[in-house]
């Protein structure tokens, strides 16, 4: 592989975050009293399954240059619908959850694409409305799922390390990766994320693609919520902001840019696994939860500052000035910085 | 072919449906307000002085917070998602500083709240960092530090001075007076000061404001400082009311404040908005929740209707602005 392609942030970020977190994970016995067991890998993948689908949903909308804050709302509603509609058979629950996710995504996508609304206020309002709806559906209480065989099935170990839940999540990441690599959807998604007007002129069906992205985002979040509810055997109407923060961290570590137009599902996979590994390290090392919180805050803070456009411009300007005072001809990779 | 006539006709034909659209939206909003008022009046115990006081009281704390957020939104830096945590942390500081007396504690709270928020504003203003993700990170950081310092326990007041904030002069809570004062102050700053005018310009077009030589970074930082100071005022009232403060003191204030700003018709993209609109938004949401409560709907339904109101207002404001500025 060429050095320049590794240096691209969408490869560099997930690869280095995986490398660092795997190192921290493998070295657990050196800085704590615990030893590593295959159970820890299984647990990591369970955290990955809990987080993966909303990270993928959020990441896909970010690649398209939008920010779907409603993912956690859909995730919560999905869990609640799965529990309430799936008491007799899990399939009804999944169907209700994913159907609702698709419908919500469709409405949001049509609003954002059809009226050229900014996605932030729309998805934020949807998030508020969905939390209200979920709480109204459950009377504000946690609802338990009585079908214990489903709960046992989704979390049973497969090949020591996996469970059906983590395999489904992994499969959806790979499916999204394949679709975005093998079809032109990937290129078009990045195109509408980086320059919407130019991609419209170039013949990309911007509206259709945006609606589809929001629909996929809704379906994935709802499925993630349904799987979590089956696994926990209950659905909680108030998830707090933690899932959103972890999903955003995973997407950003996965090499997705806040400005849109950059990223790939495989990078998102890397970012999510890195966040899951971090969570497992924190659990095994028994850090107090506020230390983990501070750590995530620092991580997100660093990423968002490094990603800040004006800071980036200032650095590029400084570097150009420094180089031109040494060498009158511009270095070849300087052009790359502007691209 | 006389190109002048054709062009002006073309302009007229293009404008007419847009103007009609604006008129239609205005009529729609008016109709909705009249319908809501009718539902309100038909609700038993809605049109009473005691209930009006209840609405104002519940609007006051969200309103003060939303006024602070209005400064952030007008300046074009979207929203802060760290409001609840800032309120919790400054509420703790306010109660812990009670031994110094009410006024010093209030000053300390306001300065700390302002500085915490201004720090985020500086990163947004100078480096153009994404405010949504930055404030998500800040919310985690503030909650983490607050939990670490207090060990996860509640902070109790160290003096009795705080209780004066619970006073009800003329049987109206002090926080309602604070809301009116804060609204007047924010409106004056936005309309009458150079800072206010440049904040609108920066929100409207950051690049142009920078090209025109406006201090984008400094103005944004100052706006966030003002926002943080108002969050701290809310924190003082909330902490005084609860007589204790823990990390959950802020509750759902982040989303309530955003909902109030958006329901007032301020676009999230920045460059427009006013204290009056935010005040109207806060009262609208408080009144709607009140009607639903009086009619016996659950908290969940109230929250859902709040979300729906925000969605509808966001869409209508967007359509209307697009109609006015083709």
Image (spheres, coloured by chain):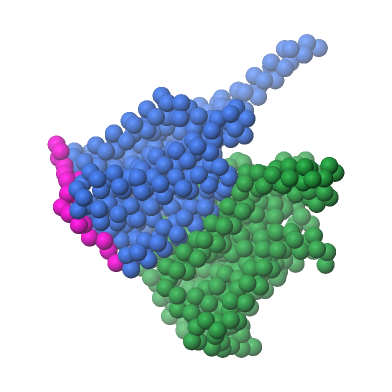
Q: In this rendering, would A312 be left or right of B133?
A: right
Provide residue A333's location: percent of width, then percent of height: 80, 52
Residue at 75% x, 67% y is A178
Residue A266 visible somewhere in the drawing: yes
Residue at 45% x, 75% y is A287
Residue B45 visible somewhere in the drawing: no
Q: Which residues are magenta?
A: B153-171
Q: In this rendering, would A335 be left or right of B138?
A: right
Q: In this rendering, would B266 be left or right of B170?
A: right
Provide residue A42's location: percent of width, then percent of height: 57, 83
Assess whether residue B215 is covered by the magenta stretch.
Answer: no
Provide residue A186's location: percent of width, then percent of height: 74, 58
Q: In this rendering, would B308 be left or right of A309?
A: left
The image quadrant that residue B322 belongs to is top right
Q: Quadrant of the N terminus of chain A?
A: bottom right
The image quadrant that residue A254 belongs to is bottom right
Of the chain colours in the picture, the one used for chain A is: green
How many labels sit on residues? Answer: 0
Q: Which residue is at the far top?
A: B2
In this view, the residue in front, B204 or B163, is B163
In this view, the residue in front, A69 or A287, is A287
Q: Which residue is at the far front?
A: A326
Of the chain colours in the picture, the one used for chain B is: blue
Provide residue B78's location: percent of width, then percent of height: 51, 44
In this view, the residue in front, A291 or B259, is A291
In this view, the residue in front, B265 or A288, is A288
Residue at 74% x, 15% y is B6
Residue at 62% x, 77% y is A23
């Amino acid at each position: 592989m060429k050095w320049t392609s590794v240096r691209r942030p969408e490869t560099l970020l997930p690869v280095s975050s995986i490398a660092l977190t795997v190192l921290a994970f493998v070295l657990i016995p050196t800085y704590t009293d615990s030893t590593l067991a295959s159970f820890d890998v299984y647990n990591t993948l369970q955290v990955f399954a809990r987080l993966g689908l909303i990270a993928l949903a959020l990441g896909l909308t970010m690649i398209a240059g939008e920010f779907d804050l409603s993912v956690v709302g859909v995730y919560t509603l999905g869990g609640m619908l799965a529990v309430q509609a799936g008491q007799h058979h899990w399939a009804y629950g999944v169907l209700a959850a994913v159907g609702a996710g698709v419908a919500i995504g469709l409405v949001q996508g049509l609003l954002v694409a059809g009226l050229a609304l900014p996605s932030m206020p729309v998805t934020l309002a949807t998030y508020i409305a969905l939390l209200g709806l979920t709480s109204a559906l459950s009377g504000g209480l946690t609802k338990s799922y009585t079908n214990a065989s489903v709960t046992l099935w989704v979390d049973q170990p497969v090949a020591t390390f996996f469970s059906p839940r983590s395999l489904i999540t992994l499969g959806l990441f790979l499916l999204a990766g394949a679709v975005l690599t093998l079809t032109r959807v990937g290129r078009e998604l990045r195109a509408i994320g980086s320059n919407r007007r130019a991609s419209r002129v170039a013949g990309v069906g911007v509206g259709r693609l945006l609606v589809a992205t929001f629909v996929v985002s809704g379906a994935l979040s709802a499925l993630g919520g349904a799987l979590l509810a089956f696994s926990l055997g209950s659905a909680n109407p108030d998830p707090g902001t933690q899932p959103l923060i972890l999903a955003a961290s995973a997407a950003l570590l996965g090499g997705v840019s806040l400005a849109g137009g950059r990223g790939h599902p495989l990078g998102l996979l890397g970012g999510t696994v890195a966040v899951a590994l971090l969570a497992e390290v924190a659990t095994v090392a028994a850090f107090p939860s506020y230390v983990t919180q501070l750590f995530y805050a620092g991580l997100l803070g660093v990423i968002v500052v490094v990603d800040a456009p004006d800071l980036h411009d200032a650095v590029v300007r400084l570097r150009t000035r420094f180089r031109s005072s040494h060498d009158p001809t511009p270095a070849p990779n300087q052009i790359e910085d502007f691209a | 072919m006389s190109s002048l006539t054709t062009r002006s006709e073309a302009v007229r034909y293009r404008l007419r449906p847009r103007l009609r659209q604006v008129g239609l939206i205005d009529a729609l909003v008016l109709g909705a307000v009249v319908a809501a008022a009718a539902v309100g009046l038909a609700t038993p115990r809605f049109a009473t002085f005691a209930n009006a006081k209840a609405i104002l009281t519940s609007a006051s704390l969200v309103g003060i917070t939303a006024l602070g957020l209005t400064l952030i939104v007008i300046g074009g830096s979207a929203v802060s998602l760290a409001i609840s945590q800032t309120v919790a942390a400054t509420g703790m500081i306010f109660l812990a500083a009670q031994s110094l007396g009410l006024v010093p504690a209030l000053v300390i709270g306001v300065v700390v709240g302002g500085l915490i928020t201004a720090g985020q504003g500086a990163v947004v203003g100078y480096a153009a960092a994404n405010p949504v993700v930055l404030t998500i990170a800040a919310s985690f950081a503030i909650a983490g530090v607050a939990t670490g310092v207090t060990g996860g326990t509640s902070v109790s007041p160290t003096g009795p001075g705080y209780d004066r904030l619970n006073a009800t002069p003329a049987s109206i809570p002090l926080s309602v007076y604070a809301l009116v004062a804060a609204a007047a102050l924010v409106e004056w700053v936005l309309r009458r000061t150079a800072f206010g005018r440049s904040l609108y310009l920066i929100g409207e077009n950051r690049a142009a404001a920078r090209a025109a030589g406006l201090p984008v970074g400094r103005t944004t930082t100052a706006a966030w400082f003002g926002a943080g100071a108002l969050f701290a005022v809310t924190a003082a009232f909330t902490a005084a009311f609860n007589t204790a403060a823990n990390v959950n003191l802020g509750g759902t204030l982040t989303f309530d404040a955003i909902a109030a700003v958006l329901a007032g018709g301020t676009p999230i993209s920045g460059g427009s908005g006013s204290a009056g609109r935010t005040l109207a938004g806060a009262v609208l949401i408080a009144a709607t929740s009140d009607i639903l409560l009086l009619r016996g709907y659950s908290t969940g339904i109230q929250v859902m209707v709040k979300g729906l109101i925000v969605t509808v207002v966001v869409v209508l404001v967007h359509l209307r602005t697009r109609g006015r500025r083709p």
